[in-house]
Amino acid sequence: LVGEILFAAIETHSTAIRATKPNQFNADALLAHIEGFTTLSNGVVKEVELRRDGVWGQRLIKDRAAVAEVMDGFMDRAPKEILAALPMQKSGSYSGGPKVPDMSRPADPEKSDRALSYARLVTGCRRFAAAGSFAASLKRADEEIANALKSYNEEIVRELRAASEEKRLNAEQFAAIATELTALLFSPEEGEFLRRRGRAALSSSMAA
């Protein structure tokens, strides 16, 4: 009876994770289900010493594989969704130069919200990825996002310093999003440091 109760709870979390839509989700709610699933499933394995070929063992293997597949999908999608909120374009007269932040239009609120949700998810999953069998996909996502965001941060500070009056407001919006993402994915201290750099760059631009 206790086993059935535990597995019912595990499968409730598993079902909720598998039902989550990748284009619209609450990161905190999803993380709560991931924490519940990994904590219970790993606890059951350690304490009950399940036989892999038993009925419960097979149920658990199936659930863990399904959850890992879903979370691999989220992790594979995370870099694209986060970077979609920070559009880039080729510079130069014939668009043949290096990529720079695209400030031709304001930030997209929907893309920004989704990027922040994915950033919260990636950060929150660092504690559970190994137990949830999606550590490899999380590591890939983390590295890709970190490299791209660090590069973007350098470029957006440069653009804030050189932005024309008509593009300054757009640049400030993208800098604010980059700052939030930096605080979530790296640390609040790095986010605050980027914020100060942005303010200094703006002051320099407006004084010029």
Image: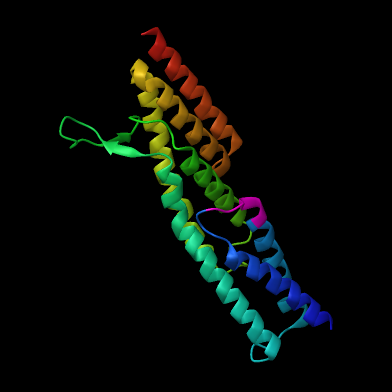
Q: Residue at x 39, y 30 (%)?
A: 156
Q: Residue 26 colored magenta?
A: yes
Looking at this view, name the residue that lies furthest to the top: 207
Q: Residue at x 67, y 85 (%)?
A: 57
Q: Residue 37 colored magenta?
A: no
Residue 161 position by quadrant: top left
Image quadrant holding the N terminus, namely: bottom right
Tell me: residue 134, above or below residue 157. below
Residue 15 position in % (x across, y down) = 64, 70
The total number of labels drawn is 0
Residue 24 position in % (x across, y down) = 54, 53
Tell me: residue 195, above or below residue 149. above
Residue 42 in sight from this viewpoint: no
Image quadrant holding the C terminus, namely: top left
Which of the pair 46/141 is nearer the observer? Answer: 141
Q: Residue at x 65, y 80 (%)?
A: 60
Residue 121 position in % (x across, y down) = 58, 52
Residue 165 in sight from this viewpoint: yes
Q: What range is drawn magenta here?
A: 24-29
**Position of 140 compared to 163: left or right?**
right
Residue 39 position in % (x across, y down) = 71, 66
Looking at this view, name the residue that lies furthest to the left: 94
**Position of 110 compared to 46: left or right?**
left
Colour pattern: rainbow
